[in-house]
Amino acid sequence: MDRRNLMASLSGLAALAAVKSSAAPADASHGATVGAVSSLPVFNPRLYGARGDGKTLDTAALNAAIDACTEAGGGIVYLPPGNYLCGSVVLKSNVTLYLEAGATLLGSTNIADFATRAVGSSVGGGSKLPRHLISARDADHVGICGPGCIDGQGKSYWFPKNPPPVIEDSARWRNAVQWSWGYREDRPSPMVSFVRCTNVRIEGVRVENAPSWTIMLDRCDKVVVHGIAIKNPVYGPTCDGLDIVACQNVLVSDCIIDTGDDAICLKSGLEWLPDGHSDLTRNIVITNCILSGCCNGFKIGTGSFGGFENITFSNSVIYNDDVELSSRIISGIALEVVDGGWIDGVVISGIQMRRVRAPIFIRRGDRSRKELHPETGLRGILIQDIHATDSIMTSTIIGIPGMPIEDVSLSNIHIDTIYPGQKDWVQTPVPEAEKQYPEVWMSGWLPASGLYCRHVKGLQLKDLHFRAAAGEWRSTVLCDDVTHLTLSGLTTTPVAGGVPPLGLNGVHHAWVSAVAAPTGAQALLALQGSQSADILVSGCDARQAATLAQVDHDVPPSALRTEFNIINSKG
């Protein structure tokens, strides 16, 4: 509900803004219409005793206005300009909380002002006894709208940990500024929570300074989040922007999120859900957003006990300003299945990234849980039209031995990396790390600068363009234990020492075409592994390389076939 439509439809609404903090208390004899403008279903908390002075606790007055609105059959609870200090505000069916420009709902810094829930009745932000500034549960047609602000005063629940400074360069890229802050376990989290609600709308509001998770949608259906702005300090501990947990039919658009943890995070259930069951997150559309922070931009996982299906993320910006590495996005796009669930059907397109540490992180793991569903796995991923500059770390697609990631397509990908890889990284073994918490740095520095793929079945790579920093010693793209690979179109800058830009290790059923060798390369392709088989290289440009392919002694002679390539006439 935008302000123009509200003002047009409710001609008496302007009178609400004129109500002063000294307005008379509600008269119970007026029944359910007390606080409304004439007969219109608009309820002003000031008429129920709210002062809006930022000092007086207005929780009871806001909840009274919501109750009256509900009893009247629904309508709008309208906050005129002012600062409304509150603890737990509970929304109900058919109620929209509308914050006018100049109105701020201010979270109390006294935890005693927040009601608690029974253990296991909700989820959020690492706490099983969550408190919320605004919440709704089992409500229908409920929402928060308007150009006003919700301010959680989150810093009052944090404390500095003062760790020693990170000096070694090898550790700076895996540090996060939020780790320098601790927090009270009883802080309100999530600050705004909708649980098992239908027909939810959150539109236009500014949401700031959350103590923990900012907005969580938990097992909701038919949700619209439009035009909101979330701003939390970059050092805010576990201050996710928007968490979508086991929800269906969700549209997120035109939002600006700048926070201290994941900007937008999808989860398919969490381990402390009631009765232990996991749910499905599906039919999610996220578009036209601007995301920033110091964790992940767009993330699926880690809570992956159920499934993710039919997800699209498009036409958005993920960025950091020129700040310390610890204050930068870790992964622009992170897709993770590590808890026995599945991903099947994700389309990501039209994403501009700047200064994220790693543009793409796709990971399957196994955190010591049995597989919960027959659909388990990570498959059906299409990522296209990505442009990323000032990256630091390698993008990855990594499965598990015997449990590969399946059916992945990357096309029209442009990635510039500014951190050169060292010579000794080329031979460093890559740990499986399948039990670890998934983060792009979990395997250390990788033997490829642009894209590293391992344990993948059905991988299509098309029109990849990489630019590495001067002094880069690693191959640009390296595929290890990949089956059914199609690579068409790869360009890259020269690699130090003439290292081939493309490496294949234990790859079988592959077709490589339209790859151009950079100037000075020893070869266009380095082929390794006794499991290598059925590899066709055709239509490639090896004029700038000494030879077309370097083939290790353990590769079967029949593994490689070459046709219609342009080679160096001196080679």
Image: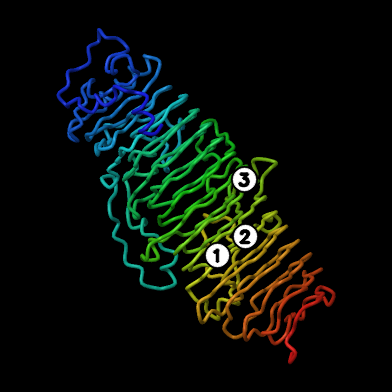
Residue 305, image x, y percentages:
58, 42
Instruction: State which quarter of the image contains the N terminus.
Output: top left
Q: Residue at x 41, y 68 (%)?
A: 172
Q: Secondary structure at mark 2?
A: strand
Above or below, 52 relative to 402: above
User: Which three-letter amino acid code belongs to the residue tagged 2?
Assistant: Ile
Q: Residue furthest right?
A: 558
Left or right, 472 with respect to 228, comes to: right
Q: Which residue is mark 2?
A: 398
Residue 403 sits in quarter: bottom right
| Location of residue 455 in the rendering, given as x and y in whole percent from the top left corner | 68, 60
* Measured Cα–Cα span from mark 1 to mark 2: 10 Å
Q: Are marks 1 and 3 in contact (CB under 8 Å)?
A: no
Residue 277, placed above or below residue 369? above
Q: Quadrant of the C terminus?
A: bottom right
In terms of sequence position, does the residue under pointer 2 or pointer 3 come before the other? 3
Q: Residues within 10 Å of mark 2 (few under 14, many from 20)?
A: many
| Three-letter code, disc 1 | Ser
Question: Which percent across, then down, holds residue 141?
Answer: 46, 25
- In the image, is residue 309 above or below residue 392? above
What's the residue at 59%, 73% (across, down)? Answer: 447
Give the x, y percent position of residue 144.
38, 32
Mark 1 vs 2, N-terminal side: 2
The amino acid beneath tag 3 is Gly
Verify CB contact (< 8 Å) between mark 1 and mark 2.
yes
Distance between the alpha carbons at the discs numbered 1 and 3 = 21 Å
Question: What SS does tag 3 mark?
Answer: loop
- Gap in Å between the C-alphas at discs 2 and 3? 16 Å
> Could you tell whether 519 is left or right of 219 in the image?
right
Q: Which residue is mark 1?
A: 443
| Closer to viewer: mark 2 or mark 3 | 2
Which residue has dot 3 on it? 340
